[in-house]
Image (cartoon, grey):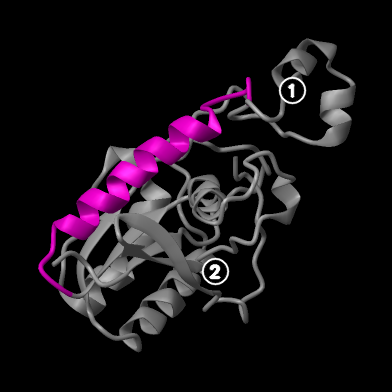
Amino acid sequence: MPAKRIHLVRHGEVYNPGGVLYGRLPNFHLSETGHAMAKETAEQLKTMAPAVTAIYCSPLVRAQESARPIEEIFGIDAKIDEKLIEPHNVFEGRKLSAKAIATKPQWWWHFRNPAKPAWGESFKEIIARMHSAIIQAADSVLDGDVVLVTHQLPIWVMHLSANGKKLMHDPRKRRCALSSITTFEIHDGKLVEVGYLDPAANLASIDKGAV
């Protein structure tokens, strides 16, 4: 039988003093707080049964660093899955704010249809690759739980999709904290969300740069 549960883990805080939208840009590592957050999440997973029997993560360094404490606790090497990567965004490397958008008319056409984003990968494309990653990860084990370390938007759109909610949303209102755990099960071939935990809520962090 496939995995009992699939835990989608968001990476920890990133060292991003410039406050830019980092997207898929290389060399954005976890901050000291981010490493501490990743350890809190690993300790939380340790308390949950059944045990984690497989770990997959995005190829971006912040996700790999967030997976490391989980690898150490369960004695499992994480496997890289390109399907778990952060969505592409045309604003990578820029500071993005309402004021910046208002003063740059050349950017406006990217926001002409929020229901079908023109600034990067579409919600439906993200859902399709994430669904594939989740099913493949679940089917890769005979028992136990699997962990997928990924990014905020991929986790959030899977939440919306699984719960039958509209994909268009306000990014400021996503319930997907740094190092959070969003848990799914597969019931009759369908993904069902069964839990959400914020193990690192006690750590003060700065959440800037997410797509």
Q: Position of residue 33 (x, y in %)?
A: 54, 69
Residue at the spot 49% in from the left edge and 33% down from the top edge = 124
Kind of residue sitting beneath label 2: Thr
Residue at the spot 43% in from the left edge and 75% down from the top edge = 41
Question: Which callout, 1 or 2, points at the residue further toward the start of the chain?
Answer: 2
Kind of residue sitting beneath label 1: Phe
Res 84 visible: no
Q: Residues within 10 Å of mark 2 (few under 14, many from 20)?
A: some
Residue at the spot 20% in from the left edge and 75% down from the top edge = 144
Name the mark nearer the viewer: 1 or 2: 1
Residue at the spot 22% in from the left edge and 55% down from the top edge = 137
Mark number displayed over residue 34:
none
Name of the residue lying farthest toward the front: 188
Between 60 and 129, the one lying in front of the other is 129
The quarter holding residue 113 reads top right
The quarter holding residue 186 reads bottom left
Res 44 visible: yes
Left-right relation of 55 to 58: left
Element carrying mark 2: helix
- Quadrant that contains the N terminus: bottom left
Q: Residues within 10 Å of mark 1 (few under 14, many from 20)?
A: few
Query: How many numbered marks appear?
Result: 2
Left-right relation of 145 to 113: left
Above/below status of 204 relative to 159: below
Q: Label 1: which residue?
A: 111
Q: Position of residue 115 (x, y in %)?
A: 68, 30
Mark number displayed over residue 33:
2
Q: Main secondary structure of the magenta part?
A: helix
The quarter holding residue 206 reads bottom right
Q: Which stretch appears magenta?
A: 117-143
Left-right relation of 205 to 27: right
Above/below status of 77 relative to 26: below
